[in-house]
Image (cartoon, rainbow, N blue to C red):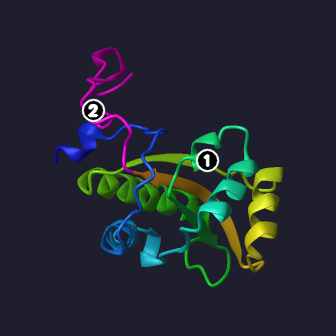
Amino acid sequence: MTSIFKRRSVRRYTDQKIEKEKIESMLRAAMQAPSACNQQPWEFIVVEDKQTVEQLSKFSPYARMLLEAPLAIIILEKTTDLIAPAFTQQDLGACTQNLLLQAVEEKLGAVWLGVSKGDDREKFIVDMFNIPTELRPFGVISVGYPMDADANSFVDRYDEKRVHYGSF
């Protein structure tokens, strides 16, 4: 599985539109993530309209790459009818990582933009997309064809000093 080693946060994109098949492939990968008691606490908003993606870039000072992105995917956390509500953050982290890895498989670049519970970023997204109260923004994924052909390339991050066998 080379995509796990090649994935990087890609922030510069061409203006090429993302094909529907690739969008669906990323969403399918996201929904294959493990979740506590198989609760699958996710929903998604796919944003392809250029003006809407540009407006979304205002949700955070760190979201400027959305100005160039042809696609944004908002990952939403379900907050009701959950079997194991204490584990939704872990479930959504796995869901997001699956989506990012599939983006690499599709020769796309992507970056995960976090949204914290109860902050101005969350309110901005909720208001902008009229999100119902039983859902909460978890993250925004900026997606596009990388401007740099080597954007998703291997960088060895292994650090043996961070590995402890048996005990600390």
Q: How many numbered circles are shown?
A: 2
70 inside magenta stretch: no
Question: Residue 88: image x %, image y %?
Answer: 56, 64
Magenta stretch bounds: 145-168
- The residue that label 2 is drawn on is 150
Q: Residue furthest front?
A: 15
Identified by mark 1, the residue type is: Leu
| In the foreground, 28 or 107 | 107
Residue 22 position (above or below residue 121): below
> What's the distance in space between the residues labelled 1 and 2, CA to CA?
21 Å
Residue at 26 percent across and 23 percent down: it is 156
Residue at 67 percent across and 74 percent down: it is 79
Which comes before the other along the chain, label 1 or label 2?
A: 1
Q: Residue furthest bottom?
A: 81
Q: Nearer the viewer, mark 1 or mark 2?
A: 1
Q: Residue furthest top?
A: 161
| In the foreground, 50 or 38 | 50
161 inside magenta stretch: yes
Question: Residue 129: image x %, image y %?
Answer: 73, 72
Mostly what secondary structure, the magenta segment? loop
**Is the C terminus in the top left, top right, bottom left or bottom right quadrant?**
top left
Which label belongs to residue 67? 1
Instruction: Say whether residue 103 is left or right of residue 118.
Output: left
Labelled pair 1, 2 in contact (Cβ < 8 Å): no
Residue 117 position (above or below residue 82): above
Residue at 26 percent across and 32 percent down: it is 153
